[in-house]
Amino acid sequence: MVFIGSSAFLVRRIGVLLLSMASVAGQLTGSIALDFLVPSGGRSPSVLTILSALLTFGAVWIASRRPRGTPAK
């Protein structure tokens, strides 16, 4: 219930694309943190996994930027 309510509120403010990308980035953060804390099969996340997560965070940052000259709401 809380997730649906907060999603409905956030979609009106930031849009569906940015909300979806931020949600994926948050899930990646949680999964990588769990992989470091409790490694599955005795292995930690690879460098490629970390780089992929950083690429996702960069995409969220780029999508959240306002074009130059656009006033804030």
Image (cartoon, rainbow, N blue to C red):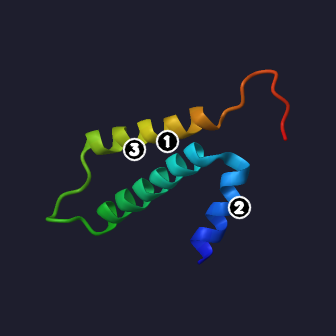
- Could you tell me which secondary element the residue under label 1 belongs to? helix
Q: Nearer the viewer, mark 2 or mark 1?
A: 2
Q: Quadrant of residue 55?
A: top left
State the CA–CA distance, disc 1 to disc 3: 6 Å
- Please tell me which residue is depicted at 68% across the width and 47% down the height of the picture: 14
Report which quarter residue 5 is drawn in. Answer: bottom right
Residue at the image point whose x is 64% and y is 46% from the top: 15
Tell me if 31 is positioned left or right of 62 in this view: left
Relative vertical location of residue 73 with respect to residue 19 in this rendering, above or below: above
| Amino acid, disc 2 | Phe
Would residue 3 be found to the left or right of residue 72 on screen?
Answer: left
The front one of 2 and 30 is 2
Q: In the image, is residue 46 above or below residue 63?
A: below
User: Residue 53 bears which disc, if any?
Assistant: 3
Left or right of 17 in this view: 29: left
Which mark is first along the chain, 1 or 2? 2
Residue 11 falls left or right of residue 20 = right
Residue at 85% across, 31% down = 71
* Vertical placement of residue 60 versus 8, above or below: above
| Residue, disc 1 | 57
